[in-house]
Image: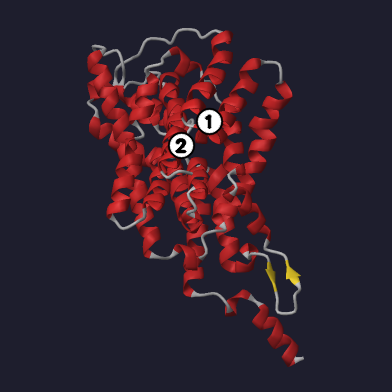
Amino acid sequence: MLETLSNLLHQTAFFSLTWGNYVMIVVACVFLYLAIKHGFEPLLLIPIAFGMLLVNIYPDIMAEPSVDANGIEHAGGLLYYFFQLDEWSILPSLIFMGVGAMTDFGPLIANPKSFLMGAAAQLGIYVAYFLAIFMGFSGKAAAAISIIGGADGPTSIFLAGKLGQTSLMGPIAVAAYSYMSLVPIIQPPIMKLLTTEKERKIKMEQLRPVSKLEKILFPIVITIVVCMILPTTAPLVGLLMLGNLFRESGVVKQLTETASNALMYIVVILLGTSVGATTSAEAFLNMDTIKIVILGLVAFAFGTAGGVWLGKLMCKLSKGKINPLIGSAGVSAVPMAARVSQKVGAEADPTNFLLMHAMGPNVAGVIGTAVAAGAFMAIFGV
């Protein structure tokens, strides 16, 4: 009886966990608290945090398939197979299709100048790239880390997989999604620092109506132009535009509903839990992770600042017709970054309504981050 009890006791996780595992369990619980109590991007943070919790209690949930000494094959852990879909770029691409099906590109079509602010907000990516190289990362690792500056988790995972940086995928993805969740906290101080109260109070003219034909042609034209220049962006830009074409064509309601609801949420569950499961204590608690977290914050700050700086320039050139705050929405966190622009503008003037204007740079930022990823893949010959 005592031997049986002893065997059962030693089968529990208490005898196999390291101090690092306990640290990561605490981190996972903090993430769950932030997601549930404070609503910090719970759609992403809850599955990521729970995956983190699972892998640090039961590491074999991410075990690779193996063959023992007797030639008997053993299957891998459940979340290992989920993670393969990340490495093969399947889940990030499907998320882009869902985003396209959920997003109205009308504000961007109505104000094509928004493309410039979306491009300017990619400044953080290139700043982080050179800083990462300075801090000792290889070119491919630096490129994968730098995409955090676009506040785009799926693109960060996509590029890390394409560049063969799977060992860094966990920290990169967690940093990217964490900063996406913290957009309402990180962006406002930067926006207020770089703008005057007078600029924040600027009211913009109502956007022109966009015809159905324009909305249908836009995803087709963007796909042709962008993918002809950078074919490697086809999995991201192509599926983003396909999802939007489902939405705007009006003839495939079932596909639109599936891509923007059921499929989107299934993919988020698989991607979130598998990304969280890459954050075992051994893989996560090291100096490289600390560097990635710091670089991600720097990249995100410069991305926000880049959009606002160009917004200020456009404000002057337009003689005060453009509110610089909408430039901060040029990062890819759709639609949260646009909502933050609206919130900061409303704090200066409660009658100001910037949301639709900010959606233009926001959508442009999604495209811009995918283009930046494609540029890095072209540079490294992937």
Please, is residue 186 above or below residue 173 in the view? above
Q: What residue type is labelled 1?
A: Val
**For the residue marked with disc 2, what is the amino acid?**
Gly
Q: Residue furthest front?
A: 381
Q: Where is residue 234 in the image (x, y as percent from the top left)?
A: 55, 32
Tell me if I can see residue 38 in this picture: no
Closer to us: 363 or 218: 218
Rendered location of residue 369, percent (x, y): 43, 35
Report the residue at 42% width, 31% height from top: 368
Residue 374, numbered circle = 2
Residue 198 visible, this angle: yes
At label 2, counting other C-alpha atoms closer than 10 Å, the crowd grade (few under 14, some 14-19, many 20 or more) is many
Q: Where residue 165 sits in the image (x, y, percent)?
A: 47, 54
Task: Measure the C-alpha gap from mark 1 to mark 2.
Answer: 10 Å
Q: Relative to 115, is 242 on the left or the right?
A: right
Asked whether the beta carbons under mark 1 and mark 2 sit within 8 Å of each other, the answer is: yes
